Each structure stands twice: as C-alpha cells, then as structure tokens.
Image (spheres, rainbow, N blue to C red):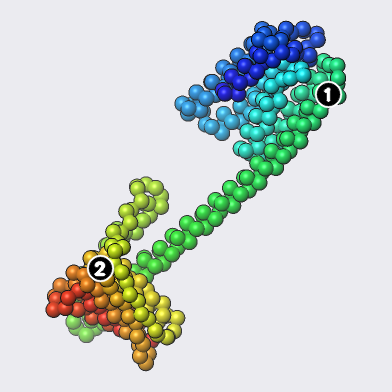
Amino acid sequence: MILSVAAFVTVYIDPTRPTLTRWMPLTGGPFTLDPWALAVMIAHLVYSATTGLVLRSRLVSATRVATVSTWIDVLFGGAIALVTEGANSPFYVFFAFAVLAAGFRAGLRLTLRVTAVSVALYLSLILVTHPEGMTFYIMRPAYLAITGYLVGYLGEQRLIVEARLRQLETASQRERIARSLHDEYVQALAGVNVRLATCRELLRRGSGDQALAELTELQAGVNREHDDLRTYIRSLLDLETAPKPRAFDYRTRFSVRARFNGSLLLVEHALHVMLEGARNVALHAGANSAAISVDASIGKVFITIDDDGVGFPAGAVPPWSIASRAAELGGEVRVGGADRSGGHVEIELREA
C-alpha cells in the first residue's frame, strides 16, 4: 500500500508525458494525471488494501495470497508502464517489487520465472508501440533481468542458510532430548532393574518384609519418574506449557576435590553420583556451602558429600538415584543422622 501511495504521488508530480501510447495519446505533466493513469493507480491502491485485509483477516492462506499476488504485481507493473512510461516512470519499482518478493520467498527458480515474464511483458510493450529512442527503452528490461538474477541468487542462498539453520536446530534438539532421556530416564530404568534384582535376592533369602518395603519404595520412584516423563513428552509436543525448571538454589557454593582412577563404568558412575549429589544439595539442602570429595583405594572409590544445610532426619533413606548407581556396582550408601549438623552422605563404589 505504501508503494501504491508513493507511486501515485510520483506520477502526479512527474513533469514528463507518457510516450508508449502514441495510438492512444495520454495527457501528463506536472500535477496532472491522465484518467487512464488515475484509474490504473487507483486500481493498484485498492488491490494493495484488499490484499492487506485478506492477510490480516486470515481468510486465505498467506502462501496462496503470495502466489497469486506475485503475478498480479507483474501485470500491474506492465499496466503502469503502459500509462506512465517516459523519461521517468515508477513502473520499474513495481516490477522490482514482484521480483524481490519472489526472491525472498521462493528462491532462484521462481525469481527467474517472474523476471522473465516481467522482461517479456515490457519488451512486448516496446515492440508494439515502437517509441522513439528504442535503444534507451531496451536497456531498462536488461537492467531488470540483471537485478532479477542477483535477487534470485541471494534469495536462494538465504533459503539454503535457513534450511541449514533448521537442520542444526533439529540436531541440537535431538541431542538435548537424547541426553535428557539417557541421563534421567534410562538411568532410572537401570536403577529399577538393580532394585528388582535386590528384591529377588531378598525373597530368595526369605526376607519378605524387606522385599515388600523395597518394592513399595520402588513403586513410588517409578510413579514419580512416570509423571516426570509424561510431563516431558507433553512439553515436547507443545500440548502444555513446558515444565518449570527445578528450583535450584544457586547461592550454594561447592568445593570439589577428586582424584581417582578406574574403568570407564566406574568413572561414569562416580561422575554421575557427584552430579546427582550436587543437584540434591541445591534442590533440598538450603545450604550456603557444600563439599564433594572423591578418594580411591584398591578397586574402590569413596565419595563424600557434606553441606551446611538442613541435613537428614533420623532414619532417612539414601537418595534413590544415588543408591541405585551404587547398588549396580555392588557398593553402598550411608546417610548421616540427626546427630550431625548439615547433610552428610558417603558413597562407596566398587570396581566391577
């Protein structure tokens, strides 16, 4: 619409007269509009306003509107060239607008088609009217063809870059999802497998009460993981708002000291235990400071996590995620009681 209004004003104040319609003389000059030129400019203004209203009301898809409007823009460029062409004319801007719209939306192929139609339309006007100074007029479609190719090339490169960015974004999202599933839910399933093996061993020994307590705790853990997984899947599908991030206390300052060696499995479990311990402190302890230390002995790794937070109540059970990792390697977890200030967790991991 802005282009229509600007062209309207330009044609109105243009001092030159149209030269392509010798068989239909048009009036022109400064602050003068021929009725045919006025009709064409008003028609383009109405077309622009109608297109804007259709897009705003969403009566038709934007893709269909863009496809149709591109060719209408080309036709209007030819009509405006017919009634305004001379030493000066705004027709070139209308052809260029159609070429730019095609280039930025669809790339090189559509841009070349729009350019070819625009050049052919303008050349046909020149061949039909045979204006004086034919060479002068022929150079204008040549410039338009060069502009169309450059715009199409740049538009094609833009589409290639956007496609590459989408691929990178998709790969990044897949990596994030895979990491989240592995670090949280797959490891949780591994912990379930270990605890089921523990329950089977307890039943074999005849310790039914301990096995029942273990299964009850395991069921609660599975339900918790199931709820977390369902929320996570819904957030991926955008069915609900993404789950709120856990309320970590970022004020807690950690001191970490670690020196140990072992197999890949042992190192992996030790690092995960350290990470999970730090997260638990930040989530639940309300501590100002915490210390994580790792020492190694023959075939064993000892991890100690201390903080100055609220601590554990008497008879507290070890964190489930840490206990499952320790059990997988035949280790154990000990939690400090109420007689100690702050939290205290000792984890022993054994070389498999």
- Relative placement, left or right, of 124 versus 51 is right
Which percent across, then down, holds residue 310?
Answer: 18, 69
- Relative placement, left or right, of 74 versus 351 is right
Up the image or down, 33 lies above or below 328; here it is above
Q: Which image quarter holds the N terminus?
A: top right
Q: First in sequence, mark 2 or 1: give its number.
A: 1
- Relative placement, left or right, of 6 versus 304 is right
Residue 136 tag number? 1
Residue at the image position 65 percent from the left and 29 percent from the top: 97
Q: Which image quarter holds the C terminus?
A: bottom left
Between 184 and 341, the one lying in front of the other is: 341
Task: Kindly identify the amino acid type of the residue bearing the numbered disc 1.
Answer: Phe
Residue at the image position 73 percent from the left and 35 percent from the top: 147
Q: Quadrant of residue 266?
A: bottom left
Between 286 and 173, the one lying in front of the other is: 286
Residue 125 tag number? none
Which percent across, then down, holds residue 92?
Answer: 71, 25
Query: Mark 2 = which residue?
Result: 288
Residue 215 visible, this orientation: no
